[in-house]
Image: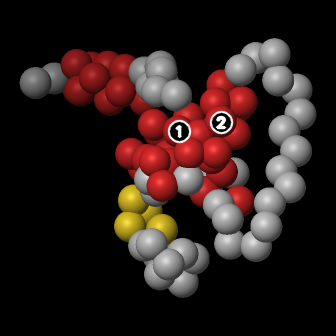
Amino acid sequence: MNISYQTRELLSGLFKPKSKLPTWQWVEKNIILSRRITQNPGPVRTDIMPYIRGIMDAYDDSNVKTIVLCFAARSGKTESVFH
């Protein structure tokens, strides 16, 4: 392999478009919570808090300009604002 090929390969990886996953799927795939943050440590699972998924869907909706959260304590605010 020559240097120009390696450079081109490296740069093409840096400028690849972001994944088109919905926000909630990206969060489930990439965020792991510790026991310090939650009683259910491990990967974020929106199926145990389905109302969080709707908030995350709002991030993907270009018509939504403002998202306001009003939650009780320990009800998923951290998980809903990761992205």
Q: How many marks?
A: 2
x and y, in percent, of residue 69 in the image: 83, 50
Q: Secondary structure at mark 1?
A: helix
Left or right: 64, with 51 as reference point? right
- Mark 2: which secondary structure? helix
Say whether residue 61 is visible: yes
* Whether residue 48 is situated above or below residue 62 in the rendered picture: below
The image quadrant that residue 10 belongs to is top left
Question: Which residue is more in the foreground, 9 or 38?
Answer: 38
Please say if the residues under marks 1 and 2 sit with CB atoms less than 8 Å apart. Answer: no
Residue 59 at x, y = what percent?
70, 32
* Residue 77, x across and y down, in percent: 71, 59
Q: Left or right: 58 with respect to 43?
A: right
Residue under the point 22% across and 19% down: 5
Q: Find disc 2 in the rendering and name its residue.
A: 54
77, 1: nearer the viewer: 77
On the rendered image, what quadrant is the N terminus found in? top left
Q: Residues within 10 Å of mark 1 (few under 14, many from 20)?
A: many
Residue 59: mark in rendering: none
Distance between the alpha carbons at the discs numbered 1 and 2: 9 Å
Q: Which mark is residue 24?
A: 1
Query: As shown in the figure, which amino acid type bears the numbered disc 2?
Result: Gly
Instruction: Please report the residue visible at 57 percent of the width from the left and 76 percent of the height from the top.
Output: 37
